Amino acid sequence: MNNLNVRVQPKLKKYKLQLIPCMCHSLHLAASKASDELPSSLEFLIRETNRWFSCSPLRKSLYNCLYTTINKGAINKQLVKLSKTRWLAWHEAVASILDQWLELKTHFNIMAMQKEKKCYMARILRDMYEDDSNYLYLLFLRPVLKEVIEVNLLFQKENPEVTKLFGDMRVLLLSLVTRILKPTFIRSAFSSKHLNIQNLESIKKYLSQNDCLLSLDSVDYGNNFKIEAQQCKISEKALYEVKDRCMKFLRVLCIELADRLPANIPVLEAVRFLHPKYCLRRVDQPAFNELSLVLIGSNVNKEVLEEQWRKLPFTDWPSEFGDTELSNSVQFWVQMKKLTNAGGDHPFNELATFSLRVLCLPFSNAAVERVFSHMNAIKTT
């Protein structure tokens, strides 16, 4: 795919087209690649726990009684099945296991001790739940996957505030990198307030060098992990391996995220300047040349756009539109395109047209896949 992009990109630039990978898929692929650093037994544990109950109503009934007894009448949460195609679906599966770890551990202990049934799978799952290493891995995974999924869902929204999407992506990347990278290199890698190619290259460079990484004991695995690591009954060697694998997971995840962000990230990051809070500043308005000017059509007069951009902050927008449009970029520019002056002309027509063109950039193909899902629900094979 990368080789294809190298051949296609020059042709796209000729026609001022932008190649934007689906960020939802990029986040999924980054997490999936990082998962190779974790033991495969984790997938076995989650998948077989779900399968244990899915094929036996009797087992479900016995577990429900046990859960109700332990939790004084509370009803157990439904276990979530792992998805074969979406690795990020792990979060819900991991969370459902962790929320009832003690109950599941007790259930498999009881099932493994029933000599008349001699269930080998019950003994395997009992041993896995007895192993605190597996519990530590899941405690580490839950908050990390939650962060990634939250950003993924932002890109999947039907009408997101597109001017803020890559800002949220930057926060995610910075949050993950600070867990494993020394502060000196973090300040160097994120020298600017917004993502650019230099930032991403610096991140990948520092993450590939062991001297730039925190020691295993200094890595931020999460507070719940830290507390459990002090109380669990595993050897120092086993704890070291858990920490090492978790650190490698974060390392690969950060590198993959940095590597999968679009090569034209400066153009896409400049979309943020079209938000009313930036473009309506009278004192500190972004310069015209900071906009995504490469997206301007060949038949558009840049001088006209620049003149309209300069006049933009001096219009009384709150009295014209109200607060709703000023907090939503798309609605703001739609209303601005309709605005008329004393002569009945549209003084910001060209600038509004350009802005709406930029705001229509597809940052994910979630909308298209949503249509496919609807079709599959309507028409079956």
Image (cartoon, grey):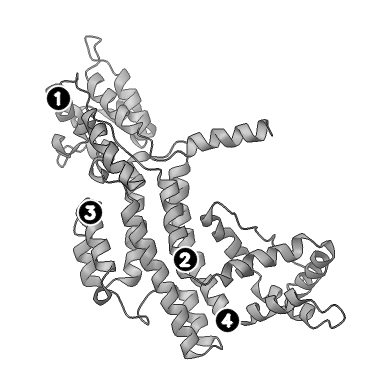
Query: What numbered label is drawn on residue 302?
Result: 1
Q: Position of residue 309 (x, y in %)?
A: 18, 29
Of labels 1 and 4, earlier in sequence is 4
Residue that badge 4 annotates: 132
Residue that badge 3 annotates: 193
Q: Residues within 10 Å of mark 1 (few under 14, many from 20)?
A: some
Quick one: quadrant of the C terminus? top right
Q: Quadrant of residue 245?
A: bottom left
Task: Look at label 3 and name its amino acid.
Answer: Lys
Q: Position of residue 113 (x, y in %)?
A: 79, 83
How far apart are labels 3 and 2 at the CA level?
Answer: 32 Å
How far apart are labels 4 and 3 at the CA level?
Answer: 41 Å
How far apart are labels 1 and 4 at the CA level?
Answer: 63 Å
How far apart are labels 2 and 1 at the CA level?
Answer: 49 Å
Of labels 4 and 3, earlier in sequence is 4
Residue contact at pointers 1 and 4, CB within 8 angstroms: no
Residue that badge 2 annotates: 36
Task: Look at label 1 and name its amino acid.
Answer: Lys
302 horizontally vs 122: left or right: left
Of labels 2 and 4, earlier in sequence is 2
| Residue located at (47% from left, 79% from top) | 242
Image height of 130 relative to 79, above or below: below
Q: Quadrant of residue 358?
A: top left
Nearest the viewer among 120 and 317 is 120
Q: Which label sits in the foreground, 1 or 3?
A: 1
Q: Which label sits in the foreground, 2 or 4?
A: 2
Of labels 3 and 2, earlier in sequence is 2
Mark 3 residue element: loop
Q: Which label sits in the foreground, 1 or 4?
A: 4
| Residue located at (63% from left, 35% from top) | 376
Of labels 2 and 1, earlier in sequence is 2
Mark 2 residue element: helix
